[in-house]
Amino acid sequence: MNRNVIAENPEVAVIGGGPVGLMLGCLLRSNGVDALVVDRPAPDSRHSKATLIWPRSLEVLEGAGVSEAVVAAGHRIDAVTFSTAAMRLRSIDLGELPDTRYRFGVSVRQSVVEDILRHRFVELGGTLVSAECTSVADAGDHADITLTTSVGIREISPAWVVGADGVRSTVRAAIGAEYRGYDVPARFVLADTALSGRAPRNEVRYYFGHDGSLAVGPIGDDLYRIAWSVQETPAVPVGIDDLTELIRVRSDLDVAVEHVHHSADFRAQVRHATTFRAGRLILAGDSAHRMTPASGQGMNTGFGDAAALGWRLSAVLAGRLAESSLDDYAVERAAAARQIEQRTSAQSSRVDDWTVSESDPGPIPIMSTAELAQFDVGQRVDVNHRGLGVGLGIPVAPAAPTVVCWPGSEWRAAQWARSLAELDREVSGGARIVDASRLGNSRPPGLQGDQPGCIVITPDGLVTDHCDVGDVPRVLAAAGWR
Ligand SMILES: Cc1cc2nc3c(=O)[nH]c(=O)nc-3n(C[C@H](O)[C@H](O)[C@H](O)COP(=O)(O)OP(=O)(O)OC[C@H]3O[C@@H](n4cnc5c(N)ncnc54)[C@H](O)[C@@H]3O)c2cc1C
């Protein structure tokens, strides 16, 4: 860890060096922001919380320059299937996703993802501080924080503080936000196991039934993660014969458990911070929202937070975006987290008390493919086509809007070139202007007809507006760009 140099007044101090804090640190450093990540020294744990990373997160990881490393370190997931022991209810084929390079998910240990991000953050020139953040205060035009390090106490004053410090967040307490929610009634046990027999190689299976739920998914190295609901506090570690029998009863899999590497029980909780921002203090990841592990969405949602916050904070610090954009972040990501929370908690809480039959699959809240992949999550503006522009194949600017302009079918080259040059002058370098007439087949669906128009894409790939070329400066100003 690079512990030596702690700046007095960094632009951003990210509290928490879990996956979300490290990802945000990478995105900020990629935009040249003077960012440090503070992480409490913790003992190594054999237990990996998250394993599943979905396509939208792989795109976000690409923005931080680490998607290739994560894909290479992980195990490919092509499909997710929801079933009872007797019948298949729905299979989600990630290969069907349109407009993305990543038509698959990845199963990889959270600690491996953190190692990759930590290495990247340092490579980008970020400062990692091994310390406990013991106090945080908003001082109006900056924040004051106290760090307890192995060599003493340091007080520093960053311009902004982001709390990516997990469920027991110190920053959330400083904001004064409540962490509202409830405990899911069922308890769960998970075990990372070696299986013999016919286990699915590139698929995650969720089974629902009267006895409870079961999830089985490969995690690489020929291991499988098994998770299941229980009514009472279970015996952990888990016996291999009992687990083989449980899989037989709850699924259609013909497998035997050969070895249990690690097992743990946990109670799933659903929590939501009442605000994600107050003044100079902002929340991201589990500090802002906690969801059940069903369908593996918690860390993925945190990556979405990092993507939505990284460019805004960079642009605010550069004086190119109004601070109110950080409230947009709070609103946008609170809505995204709620949407995912509702789906995942319904999936977890219903397991023991509903019935399902062939004619009526019951109230199993199965996500759509785009939702599971984290694409159709928390969109703000309906522009008549997909809200996310990331997969459109257009290189978006990392800290400024990208405006893709289409002249319509009846255009004259000289006149169109003049219109674009005029637009470029008006936005005076504050946006990347892309001429859609040069994009060929990769032209976005909203820019294909007779009518001219533009779409505005945020640096994290969200299409936020659809307007006329002449309206672009007004639309950008309304969004806070200057
Ligand atoms: C069993 C299980 C399975 C899961 N599976 C998945 C999955 O497959 N996919 C998925 O997307 N999600 C999954 N999740 C959820 C996922 O693990 C979390 O959403 C993720 O860890 C959140 O990341 P974070 O960076 O926000 O917080 P954390 O991972 O909690 O990291 C917070 C960091 O902040 C540090 N910290 C805290 N307080 C301080 C302080 N005061 N000073 C300094 N440092 C501090 C901590 O030491 C820690 O390093 C799973 C969770 C569980 C329990």
Image (spheres, rainbow, N blue to C red):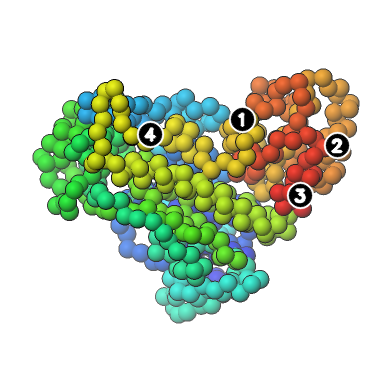
Q: Nearer the viewer, residue 129 or 377?
A: 377
> Mark 3, residues whose alpha carbon is within 10 Å: few (<14), some, or many (≥20)?
few
Residue 311, position as x, y percentages in the image: 62, 51
Q: Which residue is mark 2?
A: 421
The amino acid beneath tag 2 is Ala
Q: Is residue 121 visible?
A: no
Which of pointers 2 and 4 lies earlier in the amino acid sequence? 4
**Marks 1 and 4, how far apart at CA:** 23 Å
Q: Say which quarter of the image contains residue 63.
A: top right
**Marks 3 and 2, how far apart at CA:** 19 Å
Q: Nearer the viewer, residue 473 or 256?
A: 473
Q: Say which quarter of the image contains residue 446.
A: top right
Tag in front: 2 or 1: 1
The local secondary structure at tag 4 comes to loop
Q: Which mark is residue 366?
A: 4
> Mark 1, residues whose alpha carbon is within 10 Å: few (<14), some, or many (≥20)?
few
Query: Decide: marks 2, 4 in contact (CB < 8 A)?
Result: no
Residue at 40% x, 37% y: name it.
Answer: 106
The amino acid beneath tag 1 is His
Which of pointers 2 and 1 lies earlier in the amino acid sequence? 1
Q: Which mark is residue 477?
A: 3
Which of pointers 3 and 4 lies earlier in the amino acid sequence? 4
Residue 97, position as x, y percentages in the image: 49, 28
Q: Which mark is residue 385?
A: 1
**Marks 2 and 4, how far apart at CA:** 48 Å
